[in-house]
Amino acid sequence: MSKDRIKQFIARRTFGDGLTETGIAGLHLFRATEAIPCVPAIYEPCVMAIVSGTKEVVLDGRKYVYDNSQYLCCPMSMPVQAGTPTASRDDPLYGVMISLDRRAMVGVAMEIEAAGGRLAPTGGALRERGIRLARWDDTFTHALLRLLQLGDSQTDMAVLGEARFREVYYAILKGEAGDFARQAFGAGNAIARSIAHVSSHLDMPISIDDMASRAGMSRAAFHRQFKQVTTMAPIQFVKSMRLNSAAMKIAGGMAVNEAAIDVGYVSPSQFSREFKRMYGQTPRQWGHAQQPRFDIHERNTRL
Protein backbone atom coordinates (compact mmCIF):
# COMPACT_ATOMS: atom_id res chain seq x y z
CA MET A 1 0.00 0.00 0.00
CA SER A 2 2.87 2.42 0.77
CA LYS A 3 4.21 2.09 -2.78
CA ASP A 4 0.75 2.92 -4.12
CA ARG A 5 0.73 6.05 -1.99
CA ILE A 6 4.16 7.01 -3.31
CA LYS A 7 2.94 6.52 -6.87
CA GLN A 8 -0.15 8.65 -6.22
CA PHE A 9 2.02 11.33 -4.64
CA ILE A 10 4.27 11.50 -7.73
CA ALA A 11 1.33 11.42 -10.16
CA ARG A 12 -0.31 14.38 -8.40
CA ARG A 13 2.84 16.48 -8.38
CA THR A 14 4.33 15.87 -11.85
CA PHE A 15 2.80 17.72 -14.77
CA GLY A 16 5.32 16.91 -17.48
CA ASP A 17 8.02 14.40 -18.34
CA GLY A 18 11.41 14.76 -16.71
CA LEU A 19 12.47 15.99 -13.29
CA THR A 20 10.13 17.84 -10.96
CA GLU A 21 11.31 19.88 -7.97
CA THR A 22 9.84 18.88 -4.62
CA GLY A 23 10.95 21.87 -2.58
CA ILE A 24 13.25 19.53 -0.67
CA ALA A 25 16.92 19.86 -1.64
CA GLY A 26 18.29 16.56 -2.90
CA LEU A 27 14.88 15.05 -3.68
CA HIS A 28 13.33 15.05 -7.15
CA LEU A 29 10.39 13.30 -8.75
CA PHE A 30 10.39 12.16 -12.35
CA ARG A 31 7.88 10.96 -14.89
CA ALA A 32 8.11 9.48 -18.39
CA THR A 33 5.18 8.88 -20.71
CA GLU A 34 7.25 8.19 -23.82
CA ALA A 35 9.53 5.31 -24.74
CA ILE A 36 13.07 6.69 -24.95
CA PRO A 37 16.14 4.59 -25.77
CA CYS A 38 19.19 4.78 -23.55
CA VAL A 39 21.10 8.05 -24.01
CA PRO A 40 24.33 9.33 -22.40
CA ALA A 41 24.05 10.60 -18.84
CA ILE A 42 26.22 11.18 -15.82
CA TYR A 43 24.80 9.91 -12.56
CA GLU A 44 26.10 11.77 -9.54
CA PRO A 45 25.83 9.95 -6.18
CA CYS A 46 22.16 9.05 -5.92
CA VAL A 47 19.48 6.45 -5.47
CA MET A 48 16.90 6.04 -8.24
CA ALA A 49 13.65 4.38 -7.17
CA ILE A 50 10.89 3.43 -9.62
CA VAL A 51 7.34 2.87 -8.37
CA SER A 52 5.71 2.30 -11.75
CA GLY A 53 7.20 1.13 -15.05
CA THR A 54 10.70 -0.03 -15.94
CA LYS A 55 13.97 1.83 -16.34
CA GLU A 56 17.25 0.79 -17.96
CA VAL A 57 20.79 1.90 -17.22
CA VAL A 58 23.91 0.72 -19.05
CA LEU A 59 27.40 0.99 -17.55
CA ASP A 60 30.25 -0.01 -19.85
CA GLY A 61 28.05 -2.45 -21.78
CA ARG A 62 26.37 -4.03 -18.76
CA LYS A 63 22.62 -3.41 -18.62
CA TYR A 64 20.69 -2.93 -15.38
CA VAL A 65 16.90 -3.17 -15.66
CA TYR A 66 14.87 -2.27 -12.59
CA ASP A 67 11.31 -1.55 -11.47
CA ASN A 68 9.47 -1.27 -8.16
CA SER A 69 11.06 -4.44 -6.81
CA GLN A 70 14.58 -2.97 -6.77
CA TYR A 71 16.14 0.48 -6.57
CA LEU A 72 19.40 1.58 -8.14
CA CYS A 73 22.23 2.76 -5.90
CA CYS A 74 24.99 4.83 -7.53
CA PRO A 75 27.30 6.11 -4.76
CA MET A 76 29.94 7.54 -7.13
CA SER A 77 29.78 9.67 -10.28
CA MET A 78 29.34 7.32 -13.23
CA PRO A 79 29.11 7.80 -17.02
CA VAL A 80 26.10 5.72 -18.04
CA GLN A 81 23.43 5.45 -20.68
CA ALA A 82 19.88 5.58 -19.34
CA GLY A 83 16.40 5.39 -20.81
CA THR A 84 12.77 4.44 -20.41
CA PRO A 85 12.20 2.06 -23.35
CA THR A 86 8.81 0.75 -22.15
CA ALA A 87 7.18 3.97 -20.92
CA SER A 88 3.96 5.14 -22.58
CA ARG A 89 0.96 7.34 -21.84
CA ASP A 90 -1.02 4.25 -20.93
CA ASP A 91 1.77 2.89 -18.75
CA PRO A 92 3.80 5.87 -17.45
CA LEU A 93 6.98 5.57 -15.45
CA TYR A 94 7.04 7.28 -12.05
CA GLY A 95 10.09 7.51 -9.87
CA VAL A 96 12.17 9.36 -7.31
CA MET A 97 15.80 10.49 -7.37
CA ILE A 98 17.50 10.93 -3.98
CA SER A 99 20.91 12.60 -3.87
CA LEU A 100 23.38 10.91 -1.55
CA ASP A 101 25.33 13.21 0.76
CA ARG A 102 28.65 11.65 1.68
CA ARG A 103 29.02 13.33 5.07
CA ALA A 104 25.49 12.41 6.13
CA MET A 105 25.84 8.81 4.93
CA VAL A 106 29.11 8.36 6.84
CA GLY A 107 27.57 9.92 9.95
CA VAL A 108 24.57 7.58 9.90
CA ALA A 109 26.82 4.55 9.34
CA MET A 110 28.97 5.53 12.33
CA GLU A 111 25.89 5.97 14.53
CA ILE A 112 24.55 2.55 13.51
CA GLU A 113 27.82 0.92 14.55
CA ALA A 114 28.08 2.96 17.77
CA ALA A 115 24.58 1.82 18.72
CA GLY A 116 25.57 -1.81 18.23
CA GLY A 117 23.85 -2.21 14.88
CA ARG A 118 25.09 -4.94 12.60
CA LEU A 119 26.79 -3.73 9.45
CA ALA A 120 29.00 -6.07 7.46
CA PRO A 121 32.68 -4.99 7.37
CA THR A 122 33.60 -3.22 4.15
CA GLY A 123 37.12 -4.62 3.92
CA GLY A 124 38.52 -1.17 3.06
CA ALA A 125 38.18 -1.14 -0.74
CA LEU A 126 35.38 -1.41 -3.22
CA ARG A 127 34.77 -4.91 -4.49
CA GLU A 128 31.79 -4.24 -6.74
CA ARG A 129 31.10 -2.27 -9.89
CA GLY A 130 30.04 1.35 -9.91
CA ILE A 131 26.28 0.80 -9.54
CA ARG A 132 24.16 -1.82 -7.87
CA LEU A 133 20.51 -2.84 -7.68
CA ALA A 134 19.09 -3.50 -4.23
CA ARG A 135 15.83 -5.06 -3.07
CA TRP A 136 13.18 -2.46 -2.27
CA ASP A 137 12.25 -3.54 1.28
CA ASP A 138 9.60 -2.22 3.67
CA THR A 139 12.08 -0.11 5.63
CA PHE A 140 13.10 1.80 2.51
CA THR A 141 9.49 2.15 1.34
CA HIS A 142 8.24 3.63 4.60
CA ALA A 143 11.24 5.97 4.94
CA LEU A 144 10.79 7.25 1.39
CA LEU A 145 7.07 7.88 1.89
CA ARG A 146 7.73 9.82 5.09
CA LEU A 147 10.32 11.96 3.30
CA LEU A 148 7.96 12.71 0.41
CA GLN A 149 5.17 13.70 2.78
CA LEU A 150 7.28 16.60 4.00
CA GLY A 151 6.52 18.36 0.73
CA ASP A 152 3.07 19.24 2.03
CA SER A 153 4.40 21.59 4.71
CA GLN A 154 7.20 24.18 4.66
CA THR A 155 7.37 23.98 8.45
CA ASP A 156 7.72 20.20 8.41
CA MET A 157 10.47 20.47 5.81
CA ALA A 158 12.41 23.00 7.87
CA VAL A 159 12.09 21.09 11.15
CA LEU A 160 12.07 17.44 10.02
CA GLY A 161 13.84 17.42 6.64
CA GLU A 162 17.29 16.40 7.86
CA ALA A 163 15.85 13.67 10.09
CA ARG A 164 13.74 12.20 7.28
CA PHE A 165 16.75 12.11 4.95
CA ARG A 166 18.71 10.33 7.66
CA GLU A 167 15.90 7.80 7.88
CA VAL A 168 16.20 7.08 4.16
CA TYR A 169 19.99 6.83 4.43
CA TYR A 170 19.54 4.43 7.35
CA ALA A 171 17.26 2.24 5.22
CA ILE A 172 19.81 2.20 2.39
CA LEU A 173 22.71 1.38 4.71
CA LYS A 174 20.77 -1.44 6.37
CA GLY A 175 19.59 -2.81 3.01
CA GLU A 176 21.26 -4.84 0.28
CA ALA A 177 23.22 -1.84 -1.03
CA GLY A 178 24.46 -0.79 2.41
CA ASP A 179 27.91 -2.37 2.31
CA PHE A 180 28.38 -1.19 -1.28
CA ALA A 181 27.47 2.40 -0.39
CA ARG A 182 29.68 2.47 2.70
CA GLN A 183 32.65 1.23 0.70
CA ALA A 184 32.19 4.08 -1.77
CA PHE A 185 31.71 6.76 0.91
CA GLY A 186 34.39 5.43 3.22
CA ALA A 187 37.15 7.88 4.06
CA GLY A 188 39.81 5.36 3.05
CA ASN A 189 38.51 4.69 -0.44
CA ALA A 190 41.06 6.22 -2.78
CA ILE A 191 39.22 5.21 -5.96
CA ALA A 192 36.02 6.94 -4.88
CA ARG A 193 37.99 10.10 -4.05
CA SER A 194 39.67 9.96 -7.43
CA ILE A 195 36.31 9.64 -9.21
CA ALA A 196 34.92 12.60 -7.26
CA HIS A 197 37.92 14.68 -8.35
CA VAL A 198 37.46 13.72 -12.00
CA SER A 199 33.76 14.52 -11.89
CA SER A 200 34.36 18.03 -10.60
CA HIS A 201 37.33 18.81 -12.87
CA LEU A 202 36.28 17.60 -16.33
CA ASP A 203 37.39 20.89 -17.87
CA MET A 204 40.95 20.47 -16.57
CA PRO A 205 43.82 18.28 -17.83
CA ILE A 206 43.65 14.86 -16.15
CA SER A 207 46.36 12.22 -16.40
CA ILE A 208 46.55 8.70 -15.02
CA ASP A 209 49.74 9.62 -13.16
CA ASP A 210 47.96 12.52 -11.47
CA MET A 211 44.99 10.32 -10.56
CA ALA A 212 47.27 7.62 -9.16
CA SER A 213 49.27 10.19 -7.20
CA ARG A 214 46.11 11.63 -5.63
CA ALA A 215 45.09 8.11 -4.66
CA GLY A 216 48.51 7.41 -3.14
CA MET A 217 49.09 4.41 -5.42
CA SER A 218 51.50 3.31 -8.06
CA ARG A 219 50.24 3.69 -11.62
CA ALA A 220 49.90 -0.09 -12.04
CA ALA A 221 48.04 -0.64 -8.75
CA PHE A 222 45.74 2.31 -9.40
CA HIS A 223 44.92 1.09 -12.92
CA ARG A 224 44.08 -2.38 -11.61
CA GLN A 225 41.86 -1.20 -8.74
CA PHE A 226 40.15 1.49 -10.80
CA LYS A 227 39.15 -1.00 -13.48
CA GLN A 228 37.89 -3.43 -10.85
CA VAL A 229 35.57 -0.75 -9.44
CA THR A 230 34.33 0.94 -12.62
CA THR A 231 34.88 -1.84 -15.23
CA MET A 232 36.81 0.78 -17.24
CA ALA A 233 40.46 1.76 -17.49
CA PRO A 234 41.05 5.24 -15.98
CA ILE A 235 41.59 6.97 -19.33
CA GLN A 236 38.46 5.32 -20.75
CA PHE A 237 36.47 6.45 -17.72
CA VAL A 238 37.62 10.05 -18.08
CA LYS A 239 36.80 10.04 -21.78
CA SER A 240 33.34 8.58 -21.14
CA MET A 241 32.63 11.18 -18.45
CA ARG A 242 33.68 13.99 -20.80
CA LEU A 243 31.80 12.75 -23.84
CA ASN A 244 28.65 11.89 -21.88
CA SER A 245 28.70 15.32 -20.30
CA ALA A 246 29.20 16.96 -23.71
CA ALA A 247 26.40 14.88 -25.25
CA MET A 248 23.98 16.05 -22.54
CA LYS A 249 25.02 19.67 -22.99
CA ILE A 250 24.60 19.50 -26.79
CA ALA A 251 21.23 17.79 -26.53
CA GLY A 252 20.22 20.54 -24.10
CA GLY A 253 21.00 23.21 -26.71
CA MET A 254 24.63 24.16 -26.04
CA ALA A 255 26.82 24.90 -29.07
CA VAL A 256 29.15 22.03 -30.04
CA ASN A 257 32.39 23.99 -29.65
CA GLU A 258 31.28 25.38 -26.30
CA ALA A 259 30.40 21.91 -25.04
CA ALA A 260 33.78 20.57 -26.17
CA ILE A 261 35.68 23.29 -24.31
CA ASP A 262 33.42 22.87 -21.29
CA VAL A 263 34.53 19.25 -20.85
CA GLY A 264 38.23 19.81 -21.43
CA TYR A 265 38.76 19.35 -25.18
CA VAL A 266 41.23 21.78 -26.79
CA SER A 267 40.97 20.40 -30.34
CA PRO A 268 37.48 20.54 -31.95
CA SER A 269 38.52 17.94 -34.54
CA GLN A 270 39.66 15.50 -31.84
CA PHE A 271 36.42 16.04 -29.97
CA SER A 272 34.36 15.40 -33.12
CA ARG A 273 36.36 12.24 -33.93
CA GLU A 274 36.04 10.75 -30.46
CA PHE A 275 32.38 11.73 -30.19
CA LYS A 276 31.53 10.03 -33.49
CA ARG A 277 33.53 6.95 -32.53
CA MET A 278 31.51 6.60 -29.30
CA TYR A 279 28.01 7.54 -30.51
CA GLY A 280 28.12 6.86 -34.25
CA GLN A 281 27.20 10.45 -35.12
CA THR A 282 28.96 13.78 -35.27
CA PRO A 283 28.16 16.12 -32.38
CA ARG A 284 25.92 18.27 -34.60
CA GLN A 285 24.06 15.24 -35.93
CA TRP A 286 23.59 14.07 -32.37
CA GLY A 287 22.21 17.39 -31.23
CA HIS A 288 19.70 17.57 -34.10
CA ALA A 289 18.54 13.99 -33.51
CA GLN A 290 18.20 14.17 -29.71
CA GLN A 291 16.97 17.62 -28.85
CA PRO A 292 13.30 17.21 -29.80
CA ARG A 293 12.77 14.31 -27.43
CA PHE A 294 15.69 14.50 -25.05
CA ASP A 295 14.86 13.00 -21.66
CA ILE A 296 15.06 16.04 -19.38
CA HIS A 297 15.56 14.08 -16.18
CA GLU A 298 18.74 12.58 -17.66
CA ARG A 299 20.04 15.95 -18.81
CA ASN A 300 21.82 16.79 -15.62
CA THR A 301 21.81 14.87 -12.37
CA ARG A 302 23.97 17.47 -10.64
CA LEU A 303 20.92 18.87 -8.83
Image: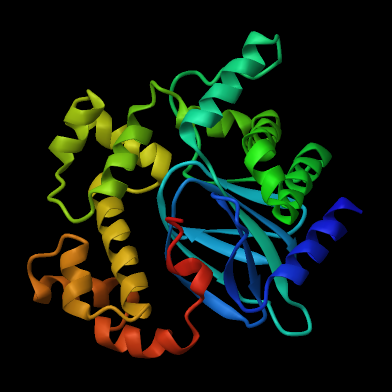
Tell me where residue 258 sits by quadrant: bottom left
Which residue is the extreme one toward the left?
267
> Does any portion of residue 233 appear in the rendered image?
no
Q: How many marks?
A: 0
**Spot occupied by residue 290 in the image (x, y as percentages of width and height):** 42, 84
> Does any portion of residue 204 appear in the rendered image?
yes
Residue at the spot 31% in from the left edge and 77% down from the top edge = 250
Question: 135 and 173: which one is in front?
Answer: 173
Tell me where residue 73 sits by quadrant: top right
Residue at the spot 45% in from the left edge and 19% down from the top edge = 124
**Spot occupied by residue 134 in the image (x, y as percentages of width and height):** 68, 43
- In this rendering, the answer to whether 171 lies above or below 156 is above
Locate residue 262 relative to residue 66 in the image: left or right. left
**Spot occupied by residue 294 in the image (x, y as percentages of width and height):** 47, 80
- In this rendering, the answer to whether 14 lies above or below 102 is below
Q: How is the image coloured?
A: rainbow
**Spot occupied by residue 219 in the image (x, y as percentages of width and height):** 18, 32
Which residue is the extreme one toward the right?
1
Question: 264 and 160: which one is in front?
Answer: 160
Image quarter where the N terminus lies is bottom right
Residue at the spot 18% in from the left edge and 56% down from the top edge = 203
